[in-house]
Image (tube, rainbow, N blue to C red):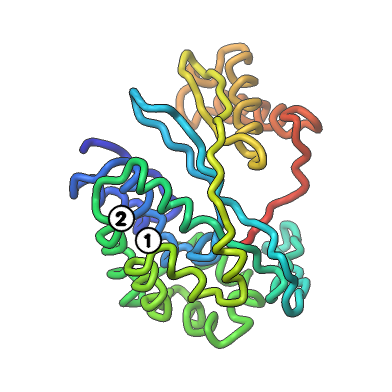
Amino acid sequence: MRGAVAAGNRHSAEAGAWALREGGTCVDAALAATFAAFVTEGPLTGPAAGGFLLLHEPGLQTTVLDCFFAVPTEGRGEMDEILIDFADASTQSFHIGESSVAVPGLVLGLLAAHERRGRLPWPRLFTPALELARRPFETTPAQTFLHEILVPILQREDGGRRVYGRAGLIDASDLVPTLVLLRDAREGALPLLLAELAADLVAYRVEERRPLEGGYAGMHVFTTPAPSIGGAVVQVGLAALDAAPGAAAGHAAGSPDEAVALALALQAAYAPGASGTRPSGTTHVS
């Protein structure tokens, strides 16, 4: 299958490309890339994450699978606040600890997507992730920076120090048993991995939602609806770009004109009330 894969890390993108070469669908590629990201992008995602999946294929209904976090029925343990300094540019408050852990829905959402539009067997999609997890690998400069400023969080406990304790390297070998359990037990793995949330996980349901629709440069654009705010922000930004004189689609990539147009579109998208939402910050729950 011909296609292109965009991801936050080269290894994750290569895992998605592998799935396409193996004859998989775009959903298979997304799943393989996501499992690889559990290994390569641990501070941003993982088996205990949540998310939204927008499924679109020509001739099929476009839909969004809402597999974001749910609130646990019981609070557990402590929650500590840690202030992170982003290289003197700004600071951000993070809350960590047992009570910061929500009910994860991502794996259940990935299973739902695979049941609808996957082709490769579920276990095969873990192949690139397991290969990555079994040997240490070098981080990118951006990852190295991120891991350095997040040391108070990532290396708070022994498990984190084993993964991120060597600068410039990730050793995710501790994740191998978790990946194998997810591969073999599917949804049955989650209550075993998070026994404290077992009842909440059994009760969890992936919600199917209708995507937001808009246009840009003559194209039809689908994005995620509420409770995600990102889709609404994207739609407002694209509408601002389309309405701008000499719309950004006509500017040379990387040109000053394109940069100005994008900046103005972002300003419009994040203006108070512009998207019908109230962004208050960035939430990291993984």
Compared with 209, 77 (above or below) is below
Q: Which residue is mark 2?
A: 15
Instruction: Identify the residue at horizontal 78%, vertical 39% (top origin).
Output: 278
Residue under circle 1?
36
> Residue 93: where, in percent of width, then height?
76, 64
Closer to us: 175 or 280: 175
Relative horizontal placement of residue 99, taking residue 36 as reference (left or right): right
Question: Quick one: which residue is furthest to the right in this view?
Answer: 272
Q: For mark 1, give the secondary structure.
A: helix
In the rendered image, which quarter contains the C terminus? Answer: bottom right
Question: Horizontally, is 93 left or right of 17 in the view?
Answer: right
Q: Nearer the viewer, residue 27 or 236?
A: 27
CB of mark 1 within 8 Å of CB of mark 2?
A: yes
Q: Secondary structure at mark 2?
A: helix
In the image, what residue occupies the spot 54% across and 80% down? 160
Q: Quadrant of residue 256?
A: top right
In the image, residue 241 lies at what x, y percent? 60, 21
Query: Which residue: 31% across, 45% down?
Result: 118
Position in image of residue 181 (x %, y %):
37, 73
* Nearest to N terminus: mark 1 or mark 2: 2
